[in-house]
Image (cartoon, rainbow, N blue to C red):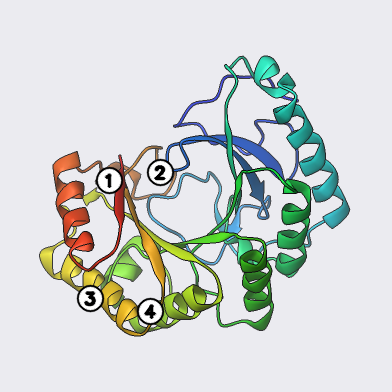
Amino acid sequence: MAGQGLSHDDHRRDAAGLVYVYPVLSRRSGGLSIGINLNPNRACNWRCIYCQVEGLVRGAAPTIDLALLRTELTGFMAQVLDGSFAAHAGTNALELRDFAISGDGEPTSAHEFPEVVQIVAEVRGAASAALVLITNGSLVAQVRVQDGLRVLAAHGGEVWFKLDRGTDEGLRAVNDAGISAERALSNLITCAKLCPTRVQAAMFAVDGAPPSESECAAWLALLERALASGAPLRGVTLYGLARASHQPEAARLTQLDAAWLEALAARVRSLGLQAQVHL
């Protein structure tokens, strides 16, 4: 196992020397997160301009070796629980906060997604750590993805659903994704009705300019419409640029100050949703 101190700005997938499992010191979780990377080929169906993945390519997850995943996850969890991981990594004992299905691309693009969720839930067992799926939500209409979401819900899991902007133009500019705002809304509603769901949004300046007022208003309107549809959203997480982008637009992106993010969070709360900010 690779031994090196963890930090909030270093989410290297090879930190434990494993194929699918990696440790993360997560600012959003507030502790140690065990990541499950279903895209070791660095393939994603989106190309977010703030993405920190080096060598990102268009595509889907490869075939997942479910036996290897179970072996890696079981072994790594044991090292976390007995303290040997913290000692080897040169960190103090860290509270295990969650298991996060995420990684170097869109995890729900894995054909074995439902089976992966079941394995993670079984390995977690009676541990108090949360079970989280971090997704762009673009594949929610697929039956196998919905099957996986049902498994996630059955084990008390939660979805963190990416919704960075509120217009077609905004989604294209930030996520380089062929998805409309209406489709994103439909996917969010479907997801939230299948499994407890929290929206997460990356907010940052491009060429020194924050998201426009019209873009923010459209984004807030999508949240309001989701609530009006009966989607039981758990809340919204706004976050900035904690790690450097490895996309061509990287030099154009800068962090927004806390006041700007908190002001947007206040507008989210006015809709009746909880909102938190992570710089």
Mark closer to the chain start, 4 or 2: 4
- Mark 4 sits on what residue? 185
Mark closer to the chain start, 3 or 4: 4
| Residue 21, quarter of the rendered image | top right
* Above or below 106: residue 3: above
Does the rendering let one see residue 167?
no
- Say which amino acid is labelled 1: Leu
Alpha-carbon span between mark 2 and mark 1: 8 Å
Does the rendering let one see residue 70?
yes
On the rendered image, what quadrant is the N terminus found in? top right
- Tags 2 and 1 touching, CB below 8 Å: yes
Answer left or right for 273 relative to 214. Answer: right
Q: What SS does tag 1 mark? A: strand
- Tags 3 and 4 touching, CB below 8 Å: no
Alpha-carbon span between mark 3 and mark 4: 10 Å
- Mark 2 sits on what residue? 245
Residue under the image location 61 percent in, 44 percent down: 129
Answer left or right for 26 relative to 239. Answer: right
- Mark 1 sits on what residue? 253
Mark closer to the chain start, 2 or 3: 3
- Mark 3 sits on what residue? 221
Alpha-carbon span between mark 1 and mark 3: 25 Å
* Above or below 203: residue 198: below
Q: What SS does tag 2 mark? A: loop
* Above or below 43: residue 259: above
Which of label 4 and label 2 is nearer to you? 4
